Image (cartoon, rainbow, N blue to C red):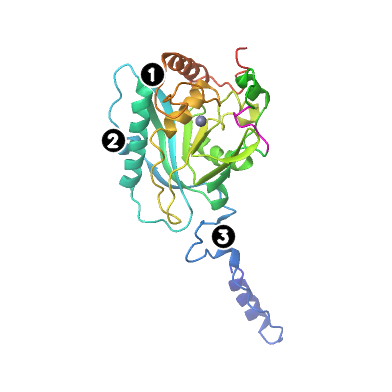
Amino acid sequence: MSRRPALVIVCLLAGCGDNRVTPPEPPDAACVPADPPSADCADPCFDDRGPELRMELAVADLALPPPPGGSTPVRVSLFYTVAPQEPGTWSRSDVADRMRQIVTSTDAILAQCDMHVEVEVAQVIALPARLLDIQGNEEGSFGGHPPKGTPDPDLFDYEQNERLTAESREVFEYGKTHSSKNTIDAYTIDHIVYYANQMLDEAGGLSYPPNIYHHVDDYPYRNAVLLVPEYGACGDLPGMPGTRTLAHEIGHMLLNTGGHNGAFNNLMVNGTVLTAAQCDTMAANLDALFGDAEVPDPGPPGG
Ligand SMILES: [Zn+2]
């Protein structure tokens, strides 16, 4: 379409008398967003576009209560994601309310370890459908779920040398241009498919613990977790993730394992409880892997 003025100029110079009619160019169908948007928000018009900032909030906008004295901060950046279609009717305070609830419910669990979420960056970003429906790992991966009876599951996971998928990397690279390397970037996402014990599965959340994702080229992008709330109409702000989802995914990151070991009601099983031993491991890994030091590959477990 941008060439039309040029055609007019050419026509004037040529006097328009040569009868060589140039048909008008049809509109570029790929760049006219479907109206109304398709139910799954898939629209080729947006496919070429990557993550785009829609709204940046100051941490003060979240109006978080002060953490208890002596509590250890776990640095987290929060990225709510929306489809790139025309935004719905959400406001800055809607985003702040959701983020505050996520932090508050996570802090209620992490308090067992004298830890709390310290928000570094808070944004709403637009993702095209190809990134909102993410493939979490490569086909046939174990995804932190080794075959039953594997003697040393963490060593097994380490030896899988899993990599970030192109989609997850594209999203996580955006976050790491805005957040510190060892901050855990938390994203909402519409849909996750991933392989657990080589079987295709779906997830309400996903994490990328250093023990599994330790290829040097995936650092620091693997310092990210995904949360799956309910997405409404295209462009709307999604609802709330599960109240224990972020804490559970942070648990994977700080326990540095894809495992789900523990008693009934443990955070890593189906509840919210953290044991003293888990808290000790989380505190040690918070220092070793999520402090200032850059550790692309933590080495095999126990090594
Ligand atoms: Zn899990």
Q: Nearer the viewer, residue 232 or 128?
A: 232
Q: Nearer the viewer, residue 259 or 293?
A: 259
Q: Upstream in the sequence, badge 3 or badge 1?
A: 3
Q: Is residue 189 above or below residue 183?
A: below
Amino acid, disc 3? Cys
Magenta stretch? 140-146
Q: Which mark is residue 113?
A: 1
Under 8 Å from ligand 1: the CB of mark 3? Answer: no
| Pointer 2 with pointer 1, Cβ within 8 A | no
Q: Is residue 13 above or below residue 78?
A: below
* Alpha carbon distance from label 3 to label 1: 47 Å
- Mark 1 lies on a secondary structure that is helix
Q: Residues within 10 Å of mark 1 (few under 14, many from 20)?
A: some
Report which residue position mark 3 lands on. Answer: 45
- Mark 2 lies on a secondary structure that is loop
Give the side of residue 67 with respect to residue 283, left or right: left
The label nearer to you, 3 versus 1, is: 1
The label nearer to you, 2 versus 1, is: 1
Estimate the x, y position of residue 53 in percent, counting from the top left: 46, 46
Q: Quadrant of the C terminus?
A: top right
Q: Quadrant of the N terminus?
A: bottom right
Q: Is residue 296 above or below residue 121?
A: above
Residue drawn at x 31%, y 45% as measured from the top left: 93
**Residue 241 is a magenta residue:** no
Amino acid, disc 1? Cys
The reply to whether residue 122 is in sight is yes
Q: Which mark is residue 63?
A: 2
Give the side of residue 24 with respect to residue 62, left or right: right
Q: Nearer the viewer, residue 7 or 283?
A: 283
Amino acid, disc 2? Ala
